[in-house]
Image (cartoon, coloured by chain):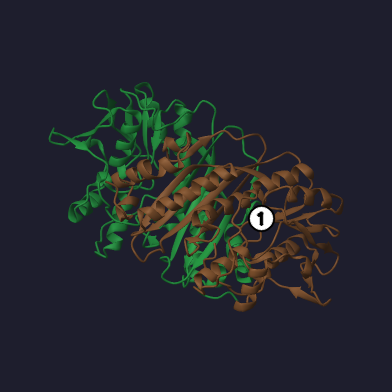
Chain colours: A brown, B green
């Protein structure tokens, strides 16, 4: 009989670990490559340069409106690979579990991983499970690493923004971060908020089909839109000007930000991307974004200018201008 | 000024995170691909099938005779990729840090990562850092994922053992596990023990050059030699018979096992491998192993037989025979 909570023995590499893998994990996550249960996965890759990315997910609570640590761990890494202009194909999945996590919680998380992987069109092909004693971790941390392939002619990079480029955003900001914050604060806010956790690889493929010469792609997760734009401005040694009124923020999210004192510019997103494209590509890329389920509200929010290298400015609703710096402190730990 | 301990802000994706990356990590780990600081790494891979593996390292203490969590995180994943018959090339590195880890500890660990990566001939090309509040993790957990390339004609798999195959072992067992255990127990044992943490990819390349048709490779980490052999016997549906007297155990390690009541067969190794090869390849593969610095004590310890599928037996020194089962409980958590 499978114990109802995770025990240290489940991570010991012995009998119980073997049963956890074969009786709990493989039925949920299995595929021909993973089923091999070797020290690693072996597969062929299509031709092209390879993109490789990793992230560990430590979000709390584990389950929240719009998602869970399980789908976040898939979507986050899928998106990082996609932001390289790549088509993500394979994921690794490494769990650090605190002794005492219930088997039901683990199964629910693994099912979310499986559903998210199917939705994103990627396969979990290799993995690892460690169990640490109570108090040595908090419930579960999940690391994923992802591998994708970059098509010929695609060349995305944070250093490739050029003056004149248009800055496109795929939709409203701050949904993920404010959802987690209000959950965590147990504010009992009856606001209609949910995480935007979503795979963006399909949208990126549409965008690259419309305009293979896209300069920069980035998903503004921790640090939010403001920090992502600062990083791009620094790496490309350009200035970026954003029109505050053009940046979509849902009313409920704006209200929660107001109430809790957060600037939505710095709040994490988990299903949004920014693209910097030459002006002649703007219309085609926007149309491609809007044709995707996760980009219906895509819009142009600003442009790259010849101002001070590394500087991001925001034109405010009342016509003023302010400098956008990187996030200077922690808004809230364990947002992703 | 860089703070002397890791703060939550270091994981927030903002200014302090940016400085941690550019001022602490890149000077230690930097290379042309990592320096790009994109959401992921982009590179070309040589022709061949790709091997992909991941492991999270949670070992305590962080530093121990013969190694640290830093070199373990490199060697462990390098070895998992090598056990696929692949040449490991690229690693990802994802840190989960508990607030309060000292900057000096982090730098020491990162330097160990850098030294181990150079020694193994791999590059850390992408990474992630999360910081969790005090009590939500224990000092630091490190995940690495590795990518390697499998040469034409190489076909390693846990299911490929055949009756008649010889079982080769690259050296003494139980060094890593007993070193950690005696450190942890604070026994003050003045025994000369140290972890065998080492990269085995060079040895695997020598072995494959000598005999590309090697059937199975595995590094007996958690669960030890006994569990690894059981897994192979199960996957290949064969029996394996091992000669206890042929399995090398250092006297100090054997003494510590005796004293603490551990069976060296189930104690973790971090720099040993087992190879199952056709009898006609035995001599060439053994010679290749012995030519490598990490395989000088390589020897044949048993063979695959036509006995009960999945069964591993041990011929004891006094001529008896006992069944070797998978490790049934946890010997000690957080051994790797």
Q: Position of residue A273 (x, y in %)?
A: 69, 56
Between B93 and B63, which is closer to the camera in this rendering? B93
Residue extending furthest toward the front: A190
Q: Is residue A162 left or right of residue A55?
A: right
Residue extending furthest toward the top: B280
Question: Which residue corresponds to the image point at 86% horizontal and 54% vertical from the top-left?
Answer: A279
Q: Where is residue B133 in the image (x, y as percent from the top left)?
A: 47, 71
- Crowd around label 1: few <14 · some 14–19 · many ≥20 (10 Å): many
* Residue position for label 1: B38
* Quarter of the picture holding the C terminus of chain B: bottom left
Q: Position of residue A243 (x, y in %)?
A: 80, 68
Disc 1 on helix, strand or loop? loop
Q: Is residue A213 left or right of residue B195?
A: right
Residue B120 seen by the camera: no
Check the image and report above or below for A69 versus B13.
Answer: above
Between A199 and B232, which is closer to the camera in this rendering? A199
Q: Where is residue A56 in the image (x, y as percent from the top left)?
A: 52, 57
């Amino acid at each position: 009989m499978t114990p109802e909570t995770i025990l240290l023995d489940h991570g010991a590499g012995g009998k119980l670990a073997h049963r956890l893998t074969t009786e709990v994990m493989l039925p949920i996550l299995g595929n021909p490559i993973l089923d091999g249960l070797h020290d690693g996965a072996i597969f062929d890759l299509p031709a092209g340069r390879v993109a490789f990315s990793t992230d560990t997910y430590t979000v709390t609570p584990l389950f929240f409106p719009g998602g869970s640590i399980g789908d976040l761990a898939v979507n986050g890494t899928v998106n990082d690979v996609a932001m390289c202009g790549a088509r993500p194909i394979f994921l690794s999945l490494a769990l650090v579990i605190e002794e005492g996590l219930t088997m039901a919680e683990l199964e629910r998380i693994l099912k979310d991983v499986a559903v998210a992987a199917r939705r994103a069109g990627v396969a979990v092909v290799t993995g690892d499970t460690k169990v640490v004693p109570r108090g040595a971790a908090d419930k579960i941390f999940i690391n994923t690493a992802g591998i994708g392939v970059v098509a010929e002619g695609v060349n995305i990079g944070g250093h490739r923004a050029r003056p004149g480029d248009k800055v496109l955003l795929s939709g409203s900001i701050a949904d993920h971060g404010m959802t987690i914050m209000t959950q965590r604060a147990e504010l009992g806010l009856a606001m209609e908020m949910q995480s935007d956790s979503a795979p963006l690889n399909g949208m990126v493929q549409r965008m690259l089909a419309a305009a293979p010469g896209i300069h920069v792609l980035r998903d503004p997760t921790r640090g939010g839109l403001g920090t992502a734009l600062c990083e791009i401005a620094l790496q490309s040694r350009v200035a970026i000007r954003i029109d505050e009124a053009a940046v979509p923020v849902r009313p409920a999210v704006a209200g929660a930000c107001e109430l809790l004192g957060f600037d939505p510019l710095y709040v994490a997103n988990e299903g949004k991307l920014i693209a910097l494209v030459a002006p002649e590509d703007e219309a085609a890329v926007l149309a491609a974004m809007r044709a995707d389920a996760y980009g219906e509200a895509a819009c142009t929010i600003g442009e790259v200018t010849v101002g001070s290298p590394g500087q991001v400015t925001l034109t405010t609703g009342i016509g003023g201008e302010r400098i956008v710096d990187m996030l200077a402190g922690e808004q809230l730990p364990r947002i992703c």
